[in-house]
Amino acid sequence: MKHSVPITKLFLVLFLFLAGNSCAQSGSRSKYGNNKKAGHFIELNGVKLYYEDYGKGKPIIVLHGNGGNISAMSPQIDYFSKNNRVIVMDCRGRGKSELGKDSLTYIQMTKDLNGLLNHLKLDSTYIIGRGDGAIIGLLLAVNYPDKAKKIAAFEINITPGTDELYDVESITAARKHAEQMLAENDTSDNWFLIRQLYRLVEFQRVIPPDDLKKIQCPVLILSCDRDTAKDERSFSVYRNIRKSNLCIFNGQTSGMTNSAPALFNVTVENFFSERIRSEEIGE
């Protein structure tokens, strides 16, 4: 017998995950995420990972959120690949990339990204990351500082657990629901993966302030004032990165990468092209 989490408790959870793939209606028709000409598989760190490569020019890495995949970032790929080389990867367990046998961690996914950059012989790249993708981008700058030229980090939450979310209980409830489905041997969904994705949100979102202070490249922190997370999470990152800017979009939600892509994309483009100067906050 299946047990369900109350709808009110699952609202935030579904929002967070579907926001990472908010182009669901057009996703099945998207040319991104299932492109035989642009798509490639690579064996890295014990798993087969999938990525796509578009355009020419300065390299830009695009990283999707927790519940998304390559197609979730279609508006960004479409926009930036017109004048740049855009590389976009299905992170472990999402899209066409394998999950592997190890527990899903941000450190492991950062190693995957570094391995992909080495494979492509890219020494320094621009990075656009949303949610979990933003975390991976910042971790790349912490652990492999030469690989990150500039980072646009959208909707990032780096503290342990979910203290910076308004509805903390829904994340825990959804994770426990996935565990219950696993215990009942339910096969209606990939509960093993879903459990790991929620555990990332609940337990592993952490980059200590001392690590943020190690980041040398310019960073643009982007957020929205109609979000499910508190503004403090963006301010805390902004204050601890020396070369950083902060942008909070008025009247937008975390789905704006698909619902208002023109505003999002031109803001990031201005930052990458240095029309927005990187403020140096100081030590």
Image (tube, rainbow, N blue to C red):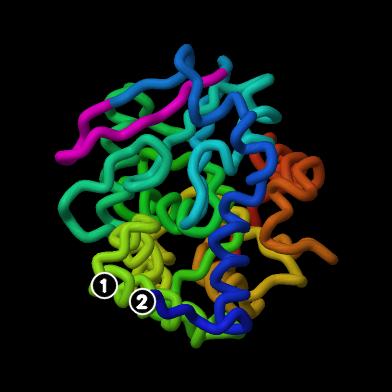
Q: Residue at x 42, y 66 (%)?
A: 213
Using a 10 Å C-alpha cutoff, classify the residue at mark 1 as few (fewer than 14 neighbours), some (14 to 19) or many (20 or more).
few
Q: Position of residue 224 (x, y in %)?
A: 73, 65
**Residue 114 in which image quadrant:** top left
* Amino acid under disc 1: Glu
Q: Is residue 40 above or below residue 148?
A: above
Disc 2 target residue: 1
- Main SS, magenta region, reads strand
Residue 56 visible, this angle: yes
**Callout 1 touching callout 2 (CB < 8 Å):** yes
The label shown at residue 184 is 1
Closest to the observer: 75 or 24? 24
Q: Position of residue 263 (x, y in %)?
A: 80, 46
Q: Position of residue 254 (x, y in %)?
A: 67, 61
**Residue 174 in which image quadrant:** bottom left
Q: Residue at x 31, y 49 (%)?
A: 109
Q: Position of residue 245 (x, y in %)?
A: 65, 59
* Amino acid under disc 2: Met
Closest to the observer: 218 or 248? 248
In this picture, which residue range is highlighted in magenta?
Answer: 42-54
Q: Is residue 214 magenta?
A: no
